[in-house]
Amino acid sequence: MDYQLLALGPVLVLERLAPLSSVNEAADLVAACMEHDTDRLLLDGSVLPADFFRLHTLFAGEFLQKLQNYQIRTGVVVPEEHDYGERFAEYLIEARRARFSRFLASREEALVWLAGG
């Protein structure tokens, strides 16, 4: 199993545990969320491939768009102190306020956001 379920009160969150390697794995995560009747997903930066952080590869945009198409609320944990490069840092400014996929600095912040409405 490459994910686990977290119960945050009445809210179930699916957390990806294994590294991602393809944009197409977003469909697998959507299916797993639907299978477990949840629309919440937690991704730690450690499971994201290097291409996710290189905006020119389009990995992040395509991956997150697939999740958003199914209204999967996705918390992505990316610590602020990590150097992801200037372009990704600019992207993070907007992504930290997004509606369906939000980049948060800690796991705790991500779980609070995912548990909320």
Image (cartoon, rainbow, N blue to C red):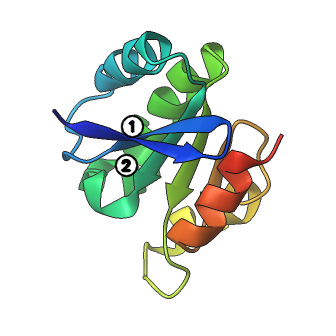
- Label 1: element kind: helix
Q: For the point 61% across and 60% down, which residue is it? A: 110
- Label 2: element kind: helix
For marks 2 and 1 on the same chain, the one whose residue lies earlier in the sequence:
2
> Which residue carries the number 2 mark?
52
Q: For the point 37% across and 49% down, which residue is it? A: 52
Q: Position of residue 83 (x, y in %)?
A: 43, 82
Q: Is residue 54 visible?
A: no
Q: For the point 19% across and 45% down, which residue is it? A: 18
At label 1, the amino acid type is: Phe
Asked if labels 1 and 2 touch by Cβ distance under 8 angstroms, the answer is: yes
Nearest the eye: 62 or 41:
41
Vertical relation: 90 (above or below) 65: below
Q: How many residues crowd mark 2 within 10 Å: few (<14), some (14–19), many (20+)?
A: many
> Which residue carries the number 1 mark?
59
Q: Is residue 56 visible?
A: yes
At label 2, the amino acid type is: Phe
Vertical relation: 31 (above or below) 50: above
Q: How many residues crowd mark 1 within 10 Å: few (<14), some (14–19), many (20+)?
A: many
Residue 88 got which mark?
Answer: none
Q: Position of residue 9 (x, y in %)?
A: 66, 46
Asked if residue 9 lies left or right of residue 48, the reply is right
